[in-house]
Amino acid sequence: MINLKELRKRKDYIKEELSPSGNLIIWNYTCKCQYDNAWDEYTMICRGLITDLKGNIIARPFPKFFNVNETESTMIKNLPSEIPVITEKLDGSLGILYKEDNQLKIATRGSFISDQALWATKWIQERFTVNDFEDGYTYLFEIIYPDNRIVVDYKDMEELILLAIIHTETGIESYVDADMEIRVYGKPDYNLKYAKVIDGDINQIMEKIKTLDGNEEGFVARYSICSNGLRVKFKGEEYKRIHKLLTQFSTISIWENLKAGNDISSICSDVPDEFYNWIKEEKEKLENKYYKIYSNLITILWYVLKIEGRKERALFLQKNYPDYLSIVFAMLDDKFKEEMIWKRIRPEFSLPGRV
């Protein structure tokens, strides 16, 4: 069980989402948490943590883990001396298996009902039953299918790739032996794919990430329980370059350019073709929201201009259109700026292909 009051104390750093049934909560750290580097024992584990309404843990994903040399513990000089298990890092979405109403379901890191979660839930329900997975353990997958492409192109692959099985109560990873064989307490092989094991030590991996092309994300090194199950990410240089390029075209960056009056088409020259439609759609969504508000303002202004007296106009707006009071008076006083509308329609942050 986890203390929900402690999670909610960190409301700027941890957000919660109720399941469609209303019986479960998924907890996820926020962008502000990342920006402020506000990591503690609670924010670290809220990477898709699923609880019931009392705080009983239903599914426990990986805690937050970092890139090599990103934190003190992941500095090359501070890594454990033991040889870790090194696997390929897959470029999809984390899928977190949980059981509800005697059904298998998959959540993503921040949602029960994201497109990826719904796709993965359908995938696993078509192939397995609720009895195929042990109670008391959390099964974690990488969700890969064409519409969920981030950077790496997996072609027509549609798969849930098993990453780990974690003991839900303790958080101890349970399923992977030195040969990466899937062993689940006497149960047969699930006929699931899993991340490929990479030969080499950390020094060799550090050299490999310099030469990977953009169609490979990188590697994950996992140390044993003796080293607290430390996980470290090693991302390829070319992958990071492409991903950085794509993050320049998040919903927020599109909004910022529109707010500034920039021509989106003039800054899309280096964007992969696959993301043009997404950028265009997000741009149109924001523009439609802008013009809807602007149209409403013109209508309200038409009514207000029929009323004599500033006080009477304020009372009318307070009664009928309180959300528009300040912006309408800015229009009346010839102080209106377009960014007043843009600030009202700032979108949630998301990237092409990911929720």
Image (cartoon, rainbow, N blue to C red):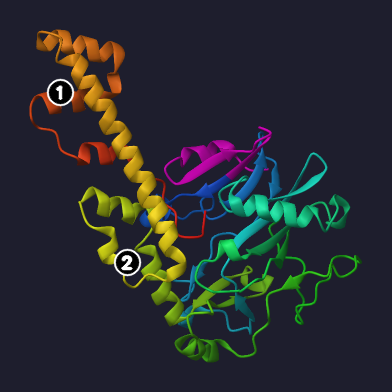
Q: Which percent across, then down, holds residue 17?
A: 56, 40
Q: Is residue 345 left or right of residue 97?
A: left
Which residue is identified by label 2? 268
Q: Is residue 77 left or right of residue 99?
A: left
User: Is residue 11 inside the magenta stretch?
Assistant: yes
| Residue in the picture at 11% in, 24% down | 332
Q: Which percent across, then down, holds residue 143?
A: 64, 62
| Residue in the picture at 67% in, 34% down | 54
Q: Do the residues labelled 2 and 1 touch (CB within 8 Å)?
A: no
> 57 or 269, which is in the foreground?
269
Q: Earlier in the sequence, mark 2 or mark 1?
A: 2
Image quadrant in which the N terminus is located: top right
In this picture, is 205 found above or below 105? below
Instruction: Name the image quarter holding residue 174.
Output: bottom right
Amino acid marked by disc 1: Phe
> 162 or 215, which is in the foreground?
215
